[in-house]
Image (cartoon, rainbow, N blue to C red):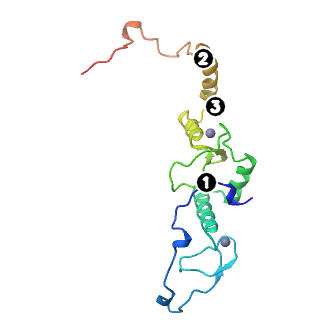
Amino acid sequence: MSIENVRYQMRNKPQALMTADPSKYPQKYFKPKGCRECGVNFTPRAPSHLTCSQACADRMMVSAYLSRNYGIRLGDYERMYTQQLGLCAICRGEGFVMAKHHKLKLVVDHCHASGRVRGLLCHNCNRALGLLQDSIEALGRAKEYLICPSDVAPRERKNEPLLPMGQLSLSYSDE
Ligand SMILES: [Zn+2]
Ligand SMILES: [Zn+2]
C-alpha cells in the first residue's frame, strides 16, 4: 500500500518551491543522488533536497514523527491503517486533521502505562478515552449509563457518610 492511501496534508515547503542557484555553489551544479526515502536517483535542486518527490518528502517527515513519538515505522502505521480500512477503530469515521500542518487523519493510540500501540483512532475518540482516563470500568459504566441511567447511578459510598440534605447546596453564592 502506498502513502497516497493515507490521507494527510503537506507542511514543509513544497519541493516545487525548493530552488537554489547552482552558480552559487563551487561545483556549479547539483549531482544526482539517491532519494533518502525510496532510493531512486534524482537531481537535487538544492543541497537540502533529500528526496525525489513531494510524496517521498512527506513520507520521510511522517516516518520521523511516528518513530520519534511512538517508536513505529510508517509501514507499521500503513499496515494498521489497511487493517482498519482507513477508519477509526471506535466511531468508524475517517477522522480529520486538527491543523493544516497535521498529516494523519487517524492518530496513533497508545497505552500511556506500557507505551504499547493499541491502534488508530480519530482525534475525538482518542480524546474521549483520555478524558475517561482509559478506564475500562468507567467506559463500561458510560455505556450502561446511556442505556439506562438509573441502573448506573451510585447506590453507596464507602467510608464517608452521605451529606444530609441541608448540606447539599444547590445555590450559588456571589461572594
Ligand atoms: Zn523517492
Ligand atoms: Zn473515532
Q: Is residue 52 left or right of residue 127?
A: right
**Vertical placement of residue 137 versus 129, above or below:** above
What element does badge 3 sit on?
Answer: helix
Residue farthest along the left direction in this orientation: 175
Disc on the earlier residue, 2 or 3? 3
Say which of 83 and 6 sits in front: 6
The kind of residue tagged 3 is Ile
Say which of 78 and 137 sits in front: 78
Q: Residue at x 55, y 32 (%)?
A: 132
Disc on the earlier residue, 2 or 1? 1
What element does badge 2 sit on?
Answer: helix
| Displayed-image quarter of ligand 1 | bottom right
Q: How dense is the environment of label 1, judged by Cα within 10 Å: few (below 14), some, or many (20 and up)?
A: some
Q: Residue at x 59, y 62 (%)?
A: 64
Q: Are marks 3 and 1 in contact (CB under 8 Å)?
A: no
Q: CA distance from mark 2 to mark 3?
A: 15 Å
Give percent across and percent down for residue 25.
Answer: 49, 89
Q: Are marks 2 and 1 in contact (CB under 8 Å)?
A: no
Residue at mark 3: C-beta within 8 A of ligand 2: no
Q: CA distance from mark 2 to mark 1?
A: 36 Å
**Vertical placement of residue 166 versus 86, above or below:** above
Say which of 160 and 18 sits in front: 18
The kind of residue tagged 1 is Tyr
> Any mark on residue 70, and which?
1
Q: How dense is the environment of label 3, judged by Cα within 10 Å: few (below 14), some, or many (20 and up)?
A: few
**Vertical placement of residue 173 versus 166, above or below:** below
**Vertical placement of residue 22 versus 134, above or below:** below
The kind of residue tagged 2 is Val
Q: Which residue is mark 3?
A: 136
Q: How dense is the environment of label 2, judged by Cα within 10 Å: few (below 14), some, or many (20 and up)?
A: some
What element does badge 1 sit on?
Answer: helix
Q: Which residue is mark 2?
A: 152
